[in-house]
Amino acid sequence: MGASCLLVLCLLFMSLLIFSIYQEKTQKEENSPPKEQENLDVLEEQPEEDVPQRKEDTPQPKESVSKKVEELIERMTVEQKVAQLFFVLPDSLSQVSQTTQVGELTASAFGQYPVGGIVYMENQILSEEQLTDMNQEFCRLSQEILGVDPFLAVDEEGGSVTRIAGNPAFPVTDVGDMADVGSTRDPNQAYQVGVTLGTYLHQYGFNLDFAPVADVLTNPSNTVVSRRSFGSEPELVADMVAAEVRGLGENSIRSALKHFPGHGATAEDSHEGFAYANRSLEQLRSCELLPFQAGIDAGADFVMVGHLCYPQIDESGEPASISSWAVTQLLKEEMGFTGVAITDAMNMGAIANHYSSAEAAVRAVQAGIDMILMPADFISAYNGVLEAVNNGSISQERLNDALTRILTVKLEGQGD
């Protein structure tokens, strides 16, 4: 009996020991986080960049604008390249005066001549719906043919030069003459002009305004610039121009500074014939060029070169719009402008009375102009430039430089 009792006591002791060990192990497991939670905690403690991403979450590299520009140029025919250098009225495509819609004639002509830009005058602007539809249709055609929007522009300065605000069919505010804005000496007023113009132009489908006027009114007898200028003080005009450019740009509207290198010292009207500015290059640098430089620095994508003659600088007596000293040497090289240099309207008397449309267009491009605005005879001007490209009078380098500038500005703003 004694041996049997001892055996039972030993078995009981062993059972209690095993139960105690099991209970302690169970308590430890209950008080410890699960294995999956431990792994999660480890991941959370790692730096964010060490956490592996799923393949679909990895950002895809964006194609650069310059690469897209190269691809567009590569795909274009020489005829399409030349067409991109022109900025014309809808009438120039349809060959019908006062074109107010993109009908079959206009669409067919655009297919043959996919111009780089369309500009509107008062007689193309009837109503909000008509204008918006027309701009949308030109965008659709250009995207279909080239894969890029056209420039869609209007002269909407305010005051004496308005195409939309002066039309009672449009419920928009006329910002008034820039002379009144300049007299406040408050650049914020010019900024608000840009905001107001930019807001309604963008609403109607435009992407470019031929404004602001960057001319310094140094000749009080000047009737062309007159109240379109912010004033006679170069620093004040510079501040106002830069502010308006910012206001337009913040509302997806590109700016075109005009009339380079400065129309404020002239007495003549370039709409009728040559306009002369008896100014030296030093005088331009200390006065007229300051607002243009300020506008460029503020982000203006276009500079409009005027049909202005500077006999002290260029003895040839030819207008700046077809002179390399003004466009290439002064604007592009000295002032560092990398955007689009565009002529003033080529149907003005200063050009149309002295040169054929073809000659003027070719000479402008050779001088460094990137876009030809409103030639008197678009088809003749187009054929003249095309022939000059084909025979080498306009080099491939010059053509590609113009196209690169045009397409870069388009792609940087596309989708606004």
Image: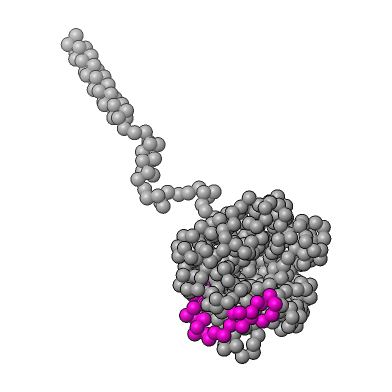
Query: As displayed, is residue 14 above or below residue 405?
Result: above
Task: Give the x, y percent position of residue 318.
Answer: 65, 85
The quadrant holding residue 406 is bottom right
Q: Residue furthest left?
A: 2
Query: As displayed, is residue 80 above or below residue 395?
Result: above
The quadrant holding residue 173 is bottom right
Going 42% across and 49% down the picture, which residue do you hit?
51
Query: As displayed, is residue 323 above or below residue 225?
Result: below
- The colour scheme of the drawn protein is one colour
The quadrant holding residue 121 is bottom right
Going 57% across and 60% down the picture, which residue do you hit?
176
User: Looking at the image, which is closer to me, 272 or 63?
Assistant: 272
Image side of residue 6 versus residue 121, left or right: left
Q: Residue furthest front?
A: 221
Examine the structure image and report whether residue 269 is included in the region drawn in magenta.
yes
User: Looking at the image, which is closer to me, 231 or 57?
Assistant: 231
Q: Read off the magenta span.
A: 266-294
Quadrant in which the N terminus is drawn = top left
Going 75% across and 63% down the picture, which residue do you hit?
90
Going 61% across and 79% down the picture, which residue do you hit?
267
User: Looking at the image, which is closer to me, 175 or 387?
Assistant: 175
Can the viewer see residue 250 in this picture?
A: no
Image side of residue 130 versus residue 301, left or right: right
Quadrant in which the C terminus is drawn = bottom right
Task: Give the x, y percent position of residue 87.
Answer: 69, 68
